[in-house]
Image: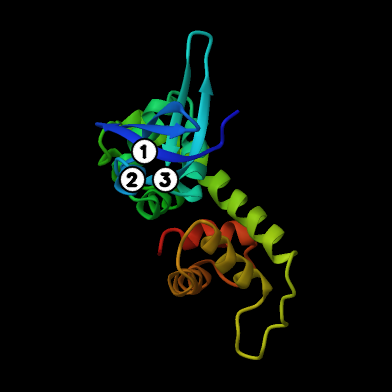
Amino acid sequence: MISRLSGEVAEIDGETVIIDVGGVGYELACTSLALSQVCVGSRATLSVYTDVREDAIRLFGFGSAAEKQMFLLLNRVSGMGPRSSLDVLSNVAIRDLLRAIGSGDVRALMSIKGVGKKKAERIVVELKDLVATMAGERSTALRSMVTIESDRPGERGAVSNDAVSALEVLGFGRKDAEGAVAQAMQRIGHGADVGDLVREALRHV
C-alpha cells in the first residue's frame, strides 16, 4: 500500500501527475490543491491513497494530510467512491466542507459541483457525527502526549479546551476555533460534552 510518494514531477496532464521515483513513474489523480503545489521538473512529496480493485490499481494524490483525511471520510459515504471524493475536494475548501457537514447544511453541499441533493444528504447523515467524534479522539490523543497546564481563572474549562483542540485538529486556526466554541457554548450551555460542542462549533467557524 503506497501512502506517500517523493520524487521528480515528470509530467502533468490535466489533473494527472506522474512522479518519477527512482526511475519508476507513478501516475496519480490529484486534487486541485495538490496540483497547485507541483510543477514539471521539480521535486514533490504527496500524500497518497491507493485504490485497489480487481481490474486496476489507482493512486490519488493530496496536497496535505488534512486533505487525505477528508478524502478518506468522504470515501466512506455510500455512493461516493474515490473519484467522486476527489472531485468534491477539488471544488471546495476543506474549511467550507467541514462547516457544511458539521452544521448539516445540505444546501451548501449541493452547491459543490457534482453533488446533488441525495448525495449531500448522505454526506451529512453519515459524516456529521463522525467528523466531530474523530476530531475529539485525535485531540485527546494529542493532548495526552504533552503536559497541559491547569486552566487559569477566567479561561475556558477542560471541555471547551478539548473542543478548541479538536477544531485545530480539523485544520482551523486557534483564534477561529476559540470564537466558534464560545458561540457554541452560549447556544448549548456548559454541560455539553466535547462531541456536542464540536458539532455545534462547526456551525460558527
Q: Is residue 141 left or right of residue 87?
A: right
Query: Circle 3 sits in a helix, a strand or a loop, which is it?
Result: strand
Report the residue marked by disc 3: 44
Quarter occupied by the N terminus: top right
Residue 196 percent location from the top left of the image? 58, 58
Q: Is residue 15 left or right of residue 149?
A: left
Q: Amino acid at mark 2?
A: Val
> Compared with residue 42, is residue 184 higher up or lower down, i.e. above or below?
below
Disc assigned to residue 9: 1
Give me the C-alpha separation between circle 3 and circle 2: 6 Å
The residue sitting at 56% across, 31% down in the picture is: 2
The residue sitting at 30% across, 47% down in the picture is: 36
Exactly how many numbered labels are in the figure?
Answer: 3
- Whether residue 83 is visible to the viewer of this picture, yes or no, is yes
The residue sitting at 63% across, 61% down in the picture is: 194
Q: Amino acid at mark 3?
A: Ala
Residue 104 percent location from the top left of the image? 41, 47
Taking the view exactly as shown, the residue that stands out farthest to the front is 23
